[in-house]
Amino acid sequence: MAAERLVVIGGDAAGMSAASQARRLKGPGELEIVAFERGHFTSYSACGIPYWVSGDVAARDELIARTPEEHRERDIDLRMRTEVTELDVAGRRVRALDRESGTAYWTGYDKLVIATGARPVRPELPGMDAAGVHGVQTLDDGQALLDSLDALGSEGPRRAVVVGAGYIGVEMAEAMLKHGFEVTVLNRGEQPMSTLDADMGRLVHEAMDGLGITTVNGAAVTGILTGPGGRVSAVVTDAAEYPADVVVLGIGVEPETALARAAGLPVGPQGGLLTDLAMRVVGHENIWAGGDCVEVLDLVAGRTRHVALGTHANKHGQVIGSNVGGGYGTFPGVVGTAVSKVCDLEIARTGLREKDARAAGLRFVTATIESTQRAGYYPGARPMTVKMLAELRTGRLLGVQIVGRDGAAKRVDVAAVALTAGMTVEQMTALDLGYAPPFSPVWDPVLVAARKAVTAVRGAGG
């Protein structure tokens, strides 16, 4: 009996995790695996790119978990620099273009995995394609940015403008600061980090100012100006011009689903592919999808959302590979946990923001407290702010945001577990969390916030 063929589109976290897991369960005599990757690298940490650019990670290859050669040693036919340009669902085949030779050809499949990732938002504005304007989605992007910085040299003005103040924006602002640039962040929103409520984003803004990063809120970019050599010279907003020797785009990403859309596969309200719990594309028994190109269930809001994180992509791949390989796995959903930092400031969130809760039709109360990450009398105690949302009447935890220094960000994991378990804030106050003065006050800041949230729920008639 001929082996089934699995075709994987995309050679990073979700795609190659799926291929590797499927190979563990079925040998090449049972399952032939063909994977297509349009870039130069496989199985790398895109989340680590800002830290490689900053110099915190010494070399690009440290971000690569498994090379193409290592995948091939596992009997995976991995075809690099090859882009899938067309998907024929009825005929169960994909059309691929070898970017090196220019050769195009069709490959049939019995089972298909779509792991095309996400693409950076790049507004169609004048000058966006100028030399010196960089996105940072792939290792190729990171290398191009570093090459651009090297070309500038150390003489003369060194001015960096970062467009966008989300995770990538604030991380790249730090990277440019470490390269000795004068850094300006242009943010269209009310405060940096729109993944937080504005009152918590204000804390990030204040900290960035203290680090010497100029943040301009309410700034809508209208174009890029270039100099005599065609290189960027300034970024223009609706109110001012900001001189720039390099521009980094940190506006966010969108699901890369053009191929799937053209083939008639279902997408959700945020543009990501829709799958069932087994990560199978809805309505298609032999097609799976995972990673940044899909929408997943938000366990708190009860609706699908697009969340581009490597943690989810790797889990998706494991689930898909298990199902393709004859095993069984499911991905139940997410609560929306994410952490980041800018220099020594740690930023964390999980669950819903106020506007998310309103959009989901939930009534809620909030509680914000200030504490320290360790006992106040212990050396190195630093301020930490925790904001908590709880549902009116039931007291169910809806979301937590944390801004602070060393030891602040990972505290959000306690809240992520509580959200997944559907705990109330009153139940949280009894959690048996670890305590010692070097690590926490006797009342951990998360528990202090939970106690205040309980009072708010009761005061509102909950």
Image (tube, grey):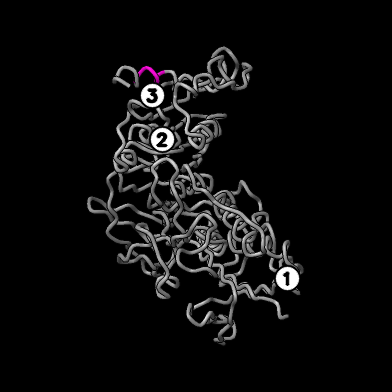
Which amino acid is tagged 3? Thr
The residues colored magenta run 452-456
Q: Which residue is mark 2?
A: 204
Residue marked by disc 1: 72
What residue lies at 59% left-to-right and 52% top-to-bottom? 315
For the C terminus, the image quarter is top left
Question: In this rendering, is residue 297 above or below 146?
Answer: above
Mark 2 vs mark 1, foreground winner is: 1
Task: Classify mark 2: helix, strand or loop.
Answer: helix
Label 1: how many residues lie within 10 Å, few (<14), some (14-19) or many (20+)? few
- Does 454 lie within the magenta span? yes
Q: Nearer the viewer, residue 392 or 62?
A: 392
Q: Is residue 245 above or below residue 92?
A: above
Q: Is residue 53 visible?
A: no
Among the two numbered marks 2 and 1 on one chain, the one whose residue lies closer to the N terminus: 1
Q: Are marks 3 and 1 in contact (CB under 8 Å)?
A: no
Could you tell me residue 226's position as x and y percent? 35, 65
Query: Does the magenta-highlighted stretch encompass residue 344?
Result: no
Would you place residue 364 above or below residue 120 in this image?
A: above
Residue carrying label 3: 368
Q: Say few, some or many: other residues with alpha carbon within 10 Å of mark 3 (under 14 / 14 to 19 / 20 or more).
A: some
**Helix, strand or loop for disc 3:** strand
Local SS, label 1: helix
Q: Check if mark 2's residue and mark 1's residue have beta carbons within 8 Å.
A: no
Please give the name of the residue rendered at 27% of the width and 45% of the height, measured from the top-left corner. Answer: 218
Q: Is any atom of residue 427 visible in this view?
A: yes
Q: Position of residue 399 (x, y in %)?
A: 42, 34
Say which amino acid is labelled 1.
Answer: Arg
